[in-house]
């Protein structure tokens, strides 16, 4: 561990709002201490935004918690954290309380659990004010209202009297930011502040965070796994891997000319919404177990450039002009093997009509009853979860289904997979209407549509060996013992696992491998349609790329059709042929993916696309954003007109005669160009 | 694993002692030696005699036979009943759930002691196996309620949903997915139930409803000998000691079984290392 030259430290310390030096954190494990942070140096000046990027387990959150003095007592911490000249590590509870809130404030990932549910939001912010400032109750309350106004909560006077559960996720996060800036801290730590939020809300929150930071002149440490978010926000970026900073540079430089092979790998593995067809280059392997590090470069086992020199000694951060990297190599332009591009699987659009349909959904609807009462429960209303969904998938085609949380994506999927008559509308699977299926036919048809779930840990029974898990659909379809025994190793190899691993249990595999097992299980009965419900959103970027490439390959080899559900537009852009956008249970726009991304017609699609962060600082800053106001309305109210109009930018600019059309008439699907369908009166 | 082996071995030895032990002495549990009242352990009466001259060794072993069988069988029956009823109620939901829950609640508010007291004299001639049935019938409800709620949360898990969407038969899902995932709880609960069953048998026998003289169980022996625990300790401590050993052995076996059935417990270090020599993720 070589420290940076002494003069750097002293010059940095003079105006550093936060200075972290040689931070080591070990947690107690059942088999001895587990290192989480192994020597981190960070300097944060006033008014600066430092982005801390890393995959899960890289120690980025631990750094943030250590800076707040929030680590559990069992953690062993060494090094120094200076917040405005005061040492945080080893400080007593009393000193820490003085520090927290006033010098350092934190915004957490989950805004629901960070607010106390039994107190009013305004009171909680007022409490934060009164803790550090000698003000009266009324004055603190007035300040709370001001702060709520600052973070863009409409009608702050009334909203201050609301309880946290009456706030939406985005509003809670705004309230958290208000609380964080209440005492004008020197440093704001934001630990994955938008990870739990939807894209359009994320864009709002990042905007608020930027405003709050600018207003208070505080330094912002933004911890995130999302390179796009970092690119849009940070002035400087530090990349963490295996408990250390492996590269640190000004944002523009880091994204344009990364030096550390890990950073290059991350940037090559993340799909981007603004380019298509670029093959993703996954980083092989998975992050190391920090207990088992041998002393060499921790990234060497996954690095395409590694040789004996890398295994000998852990490289220190080195470099010039503020761009430092912990690597002894000088990587060329493409250090990772680029997977061979697959020839286009789908014929041109003209031939699409001739392809056999795999799934056709028209006007699908599903409501859930809102019940009230204890013993005699009665229906007092309905949640219109799905209210007019149209889908059309042909053989060998991928349809990306996009929508924010609460848009009814998952409900629509479950309705389709139930293989029973829907509440309203039609579902046709392989050309057969599911409403007319007998039980026996439905059971047989289950073999042709399979699902891959989001969370690869939850979707595999922890008590079953992998071989059994993969064999389950085969058994359910009544295949013989011999057929099952022959098929399982074949499937495991198909998804890039070893056939010999059939006897292992799911917890012995990494996240990406588990998702491969989920895919193998889905492919066991040779389905025609694979429903992928957020298949990569639980995975780290470097692993995600491998799974996406696998899906692409399988689709090409097996002529599969995919229904790919995701909230991540960049991923959809990368894998889908056609895309369908949902808003509050309705399909609002459908079309070829290139067409929709290049020329979105529906105002919601436009806003959604403009909110997706791109991992490119220059582009991020130059982009025009359409910020949607507010949150989606309640799905309990069934509106006669367009459900989007409350947030619609287009609606806001319309005359009253045109507006009445939006209010009274539900927009139907209109064809606009080849296969491009939009549900808007005026788009 | 070591615990499980220890527990199983001790349990096996207890069975051996209970069923082979009585053949080593010429006294039977009903024999009365009028020449030796309240006699301390000796070469003739290995574990001494009680106040009417019965051989404690013969009596304790006979009682052990009864208690081993009653304890294990009751716990097994109650656990099987509870897991099936609870899992079905939780998995199927709706009316199945409502009827089952109603029935469970009904049994819970029934005064179990009173009913056993009324029913058991009428069924006395059928022997102790009926008694096992009675104890089991009144001992499964709370377990079933827990299993039901665990099932309800398991049912929402994606691997169960995945199995449903694959068209796996519901009963097969219960047996293959639900029950293995509640097995940790079931095993721990069953080991506690073994001790509980022996205790309730003791209580009922004390009031004259369970095992009746001249037949004996560990419970009746402990009840009889408790007055003499300090003055004639051999009348009490052999029976009590064996009961403690029995319950401990079952608990050890349960702990071991739970770990053996749970793939995620065990040796984290070796497993982790195996994972590391893996292949692309």
Image: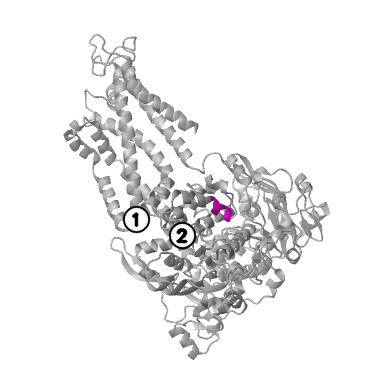
Q: Residue furthest left?
A: B122
Quadrant where the C terminus of chain A is found in the figure: bottom right
Percent position of residue A353, x then y: 52, 78
Taking the spot 33% from the left edge, 17% from the top edge, the residue there is B234
Taking the spot 46% from the left edge, 30% from the top edge, the residue there is B5
Which mark, residue A130? none
Quickly name the residue at label 2.
A118
- Using the rendered image of the protein, determine whether residue A633 is visible from the camera's viewpoint: no
The answer for which chain carries disc 2 is A
Quickly name the residue at label 1.
B92
Where disc 1 sits, the SS reads helix
Q: How many marks?
A: 2
Above-or-below relation of A668 to A533: below
- Using the rendered image of the protein, determine whether residue A472 is visible from the camera's viewpoint: yes
Taking the spot 50% from the left edge, 83% from the top edge, the residue there is A670
Alpha carbon separation for disc pair 1 and 2: 36 Å
Percent position of residue A31, x then y: 60, 39
Left or right, A67 with respect to A488, comes to right
Taking the spot 50% from the left edge, 72% from the top edge, the residue there is A393
Q: Nearer the viewer, residue A357 or B207?
A: A357
Q: How is the image coloured?
A: one colour
Confirm whether the magenta stretch covers residue A490: yes
Q: Nearer the viewer, residue B160 or A183?
A: B160
| In this view, the mark in front (1 or 2) | 1
The answer for which chain carries disc 1 is B
Confirm whether the magenta stretch covers residue A34: no
Percent position of residue A486, x then y: 51, 50
Where disc 2 sits, the SS reads loop
Q: Where are the magenta residues, as a range?
A: A489-494
Task: Mark 1: give few (<14), some (14-19) or many (20+) Cα within 10 Å.
Answer: some
Magenta stretch, main secondary structure class:
helix
């Amino acid at each position: 561990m070589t420290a940076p030259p002494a003069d750097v430290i002293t010059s940095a310390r003079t105006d550093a709002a936060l200075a972290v030096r040689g931070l080591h954190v070990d947690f107690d494990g059942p088999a001895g201490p587990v290192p989480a942070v192994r020597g981190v140096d960070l300097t944060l000046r006033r008014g600066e935004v430092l982005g801390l990027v890393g995959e899960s387990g890289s120690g980025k959150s631990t750094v943030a918690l250590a800076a707040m003095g929030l680590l559990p007592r069992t953690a062993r911490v060494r090094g120094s954290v200076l917040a405005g000249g005061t040492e945080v590590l080893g400080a007593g509870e009393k000193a820490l309380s003085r520090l927290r809130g006033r010098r350092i404030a934190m915004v957490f990932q989950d805004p629901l659990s960070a607010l106390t549910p039994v107190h009013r939001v305004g009171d909680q912010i007022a409490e934060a004010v009164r803790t550090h400032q000698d003000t009266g109750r009324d004055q603190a309350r007035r300040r709370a209202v001001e702060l709520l106004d600052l973070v863009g909560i409409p009608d702050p006077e009334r909203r201050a009297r609301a309880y946290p559960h009456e706030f939406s996720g985005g509003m809670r996060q705004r309230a958290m930011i208000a609380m964080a800036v209440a005492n004008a801290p020197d440093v704001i730590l934001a630990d994955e502040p938008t990870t739990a939020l939807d894209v359009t809300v994320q864009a709002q929150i990042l905007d608020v965070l930027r405003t709050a930071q600018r207003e208070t002149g505080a330094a912002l440490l933004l911890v995130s796994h999302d390179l796009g978010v970092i690119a849009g926000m940070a002035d400087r970026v530090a990349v963490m891997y295996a408990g250390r900073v492996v590269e640190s540079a000004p944002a523009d430089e880091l994204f344009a000319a990364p030096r550390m092979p890990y950073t290059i790998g991350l940037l090559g593995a993340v799909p981007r919404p603004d380019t298509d067809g670029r093959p993703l280059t996954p980083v092989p392997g998975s992050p190391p177990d920090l207990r088992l590090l041998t002393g060499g470069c921790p990234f060497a086992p996954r690095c395409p450039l590694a040789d004996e020199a890398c295994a000998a000694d852990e490289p220190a951060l080195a470099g010039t002009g503020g761009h430092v990297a912990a690597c002894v190599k000088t990587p060329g332009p493409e250090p990772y093997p680029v997977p061979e591009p697959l020839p286009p699987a789908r014929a041109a659009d003209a031939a699409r009509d001739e392809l056999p349909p795999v799934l056709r959904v028209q006007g699908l609807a599903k409501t859930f009853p809102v019940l009230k009462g204890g013993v005699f429960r009665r229906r007092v209303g309905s949640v219109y979860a799905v209210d007019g969904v149209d889908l059309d998938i042909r053989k060998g085609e991928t349809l990306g289904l996009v929508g924010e949380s609460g848009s009814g994506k998952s409900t629509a999927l479950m309705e389709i997979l139930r293989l029973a008559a829907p509440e309203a509308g039609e579902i046709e699977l392989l050309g057969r209407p599911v409403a007319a299926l007998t039980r026996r036919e439905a059971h047989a048809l289950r073999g042709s549509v399979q699902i891959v779930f989001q969370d690869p840990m939850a979707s595999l029974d922890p008590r079953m060996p992998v071989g059994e898990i993969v064999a389950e659909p085969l058994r359910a379809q009544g295949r013989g013992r011999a057929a099952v025994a022959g098929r399982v190793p074949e499937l495991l190899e198909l998804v890039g696992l070893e056939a010999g691993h059939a006897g292992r249990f799911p917890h012995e595999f990494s996240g990406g491998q588990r998702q491969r097992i989920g895919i193998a299980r889905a492919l066991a009965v040779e389905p025609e349609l694979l429903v992928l419900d957020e298949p990569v959103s639980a995975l780290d970027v470097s692993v995600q790329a491998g799974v996406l490439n696998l899906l692409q390959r399988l689709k090409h080899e097996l002529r599969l059709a995919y229904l790919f559900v995701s909230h991540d537009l960049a991923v959809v852009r990368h894998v889908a042929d056609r895309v369908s956008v949902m808003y509050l249970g309705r399909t609002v726009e459908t079309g070829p993916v290139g067409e929709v991304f290049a020329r979105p017609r529906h105002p919601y699609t436009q806003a959604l696309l403009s909110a997706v962060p791109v991992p490119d600082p220059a582009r991020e800053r130059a982009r025009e954003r359409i910020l949607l106001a507010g949150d989606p309305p309640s799905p309990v109210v069934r509106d006669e007109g367009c459900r989007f109009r409350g947030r619609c930018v287009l609606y806001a600019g319309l005359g009253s005669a045109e507006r009445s059309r939006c209010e009274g008439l539900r927009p139907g699907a209109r064809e606009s160009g080849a296969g491009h369908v939009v549900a808007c009166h005026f788009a | 694993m070591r615990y499980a082996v220890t527990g199983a071995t001790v349990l096996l030895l207890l069975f051996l002692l209970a069923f082979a032990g009585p053949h080593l002495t010429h006294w039977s549990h009903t024999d009365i030696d009028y020449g030796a009242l309240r006699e301390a352990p000796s070469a003739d009466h290995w574990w001494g005699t009680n106040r009417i001259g019965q051989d404690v060794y013969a009596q304790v072993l006979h009682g052990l036979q009864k208690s081993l069988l009653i304890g294990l069988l009751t716990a097994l029956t109650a656990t099987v009943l509870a897991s099936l009823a609870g899992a079905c109620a939780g998995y199927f939901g709706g009316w199945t759930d409502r009827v089952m829950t109603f029935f469970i609640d009904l049994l819970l508010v029934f005064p179990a002691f009173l009913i056993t007291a009324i029913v058991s004299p009428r069924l006395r001639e059928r022997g102790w196996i009926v008694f096992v049935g009675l104890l089991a019938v009144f001992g499964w409800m709370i377990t079933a309620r827990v299993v039901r709620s665990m099932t309800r949360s398991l049912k929402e898990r994606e691997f169960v949903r995945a199995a449903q969407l694959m068209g796996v038969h519901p009963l097969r899902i219960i047996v293959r997915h639900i029950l293995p995932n509640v097995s940790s709880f079931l095993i721990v609960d069953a080991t506690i139930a073994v001790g509980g069953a022996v205790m309730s048998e003791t209580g009922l026998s004390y009031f004259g409803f369970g095992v009746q003289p001249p037949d004996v169980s560990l419970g009746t022996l402990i009840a009889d000998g408790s007055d003499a625990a300090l003055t004639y300790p051999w009348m009490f401590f052999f029976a009590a000691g064996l009961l403690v050993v029995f319950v401990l052995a079952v608990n050890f076996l349960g702990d071991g079984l739970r770990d053996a059935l749970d793939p995620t417990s065990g040796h984290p270090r070796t497993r982790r290392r195996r994972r590391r020599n893996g292949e692309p993720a």
